[in-house]
Amino acid sequence: MNFQQFLLILLARWRVVLYTLAATVATTLIVSLLLPSQYTAGTAVVVDVKSPDPIMGTVLPGLISPGYMATQIDIIQSNKVAYRVIKMLKLDENPTAREQWQDDTEGRGSIESWLAELLKKKLDVKPSRESNVISISYTATDAKFAQVVANAFAQAYIEANIDLRAEPAKQYAAWFDARSKQLRDQLEAAQARLSAYQREKGIVAVDERLDVENARLAELSTQLVIAQGQRVESGSRQTQARGDAASLPEVMQNPLVQGLKADLARQEAKLEELAGQLGRNHPQYQRLQAEVDALRDKVDAETRRVAGSIGTANRVNLQKESDIRTALEAQKTRVLELKQQRDELSVLQREVESAQRAFDLVTQRLTQTNLESQVSQTNVVLLNPAAEPIDPSSPKILLNLVLAIFLGTLLGVGAALLMEMTDRRVRAAEDIVEFAGLAVLGIIDARAGQPPQRWFGRFRRRAAA
């Protein structure tokens, strides 16, 4: 089929095209006039994703994620927000709504779910392409109701956003509160063990006591070294006293011994003199000899006494060394005990410090979560509240008529072509060639010399034939 044939078909069946077009336009007009007017009210909210969190002080990573805005749209379209709108507007208490719910569901399910589905069908949420603005619009037959519901959805979304942030914080706060009580009990138990250990051991300041005991240990070590030196020296003098006591410095420096020796030397000199003068058997010599022997005995006795005092000093030094050694060993034991006590005390102190750190950390998190659970601010701000629409958003009669004309024309042309396919007629030379398979030798034009109008009428009748 070429274009000429197509035009001839339309020309022959123009009434079908016209009637179809007229029926389509008339039906569209009647339906548009009969349909109730729909009013659309719209509001807009701004989602701030760059301002820092008022509690944390930093920008939350989730706010700048690519799917954040899509999540916000899903939240607006969720049942949680729809339920909040229903409670806010008390739609579940409306007698008309309850009656309609009974008719539609026969009382099955909940009226809140039924109303939520109805509200979401008329709700339209669109994000801005290059900004953080979300448009919320609602369509209803009543302009005031559309305005109220649109604003209610925006307010419910803001409140739901606060709840979505506060509810997890409340759960965390409850958990941290219970955990803080456990950690407080553990901290108090650790502090009680530390205090009991300090009372039991009489510990006030471990480091100071250990310093004093270490100084005492060092002092005893020094005294032991001195005592050992004194014992060695006194032992050497005692050994010397056993061999040649007279050569001892104590004996040689003793004034009594020196005096006795001087007297002995004088008496011995007199004795030698008397021995030369009177002889050894003379009574005077014998008496002087007795005095010399007595002085010699005194010198020996005094020497032995001095030597004996050296032995006593050596025994004293030995006893002193032993006592100092015993005290040193006892002091070492005391220092080791103090070190052990300090180690045990350090373990208890570390337990207390660890419990304190854990308690402080949980307390800090508890304070933070408590603040978050009580937050009443959100990063969503109402930008443009919905106003009551003046003109209906649908039906749009002019647009519907334009669409009806376009669609009616297509339907009319289609109907004409369909009728032509079921009842095909010869309307041009090409149809004869196509149907009969014969070549066309010539065409007699009966329209020559006729007026254009009569020719057009005849051509139309021929086409109809």
Image: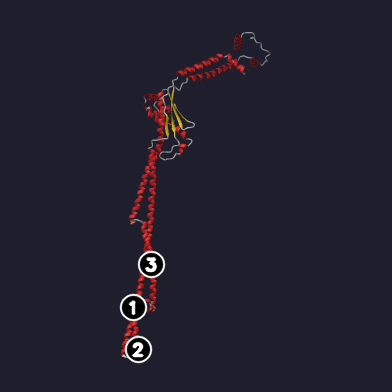
Residue visible at 35% across and 69% down?
320
Coloring basis for residues = secondary structure
Q: Amino acid at mark 3?
A: Leu
Q: Amino acid at mark 1?
A: Pro
Give the mark, 3 or 2, whose residue is nearer the N terminus: 3
Query: In this image, 447 relative to 201: left or right?
Result: right
Up-down relation of residue 410 to residue 174 (above or below): above
Name the residue carrying label 3.
Answer: 224
Give the mark, 1 or 2, whose residue is nearer the N terminus: 1
Q: Quadrant of residue 416?
A: top right
Residue 273 is marked as 2
From the top left corner, tell me how far across and down residue 216 is, in percent.
Answer: 36, 62
Residue visible at 34% across and 78% down?
255
Residue 153 is marked as none
Name the residue carrying label 1.
Answer: 255
Q: Residues within 10 Å of mark 2 (few under 14, many from 20)?
A: few
Disc 3 to disc 1, C-alpha distance: 33 Å
Front residue of 5 and 279: 279
From the top left corner, tell me how far across and down residue 366 is, in percent.
Answer: 38, 42
From the top left corner, tell me how far across and down residue 230 is, in percent.
Answer: 38, 71
For the residue labelled by badge 3, is the local secondary structure a helix, a strand or a loop? Answer: helix
Residue 265 is at least partly visible in this image: yes
Front residue of 335 and 183: 335
Q: How many marks?
A: 3
Q: Amino acid at mark 2?
A: Glu
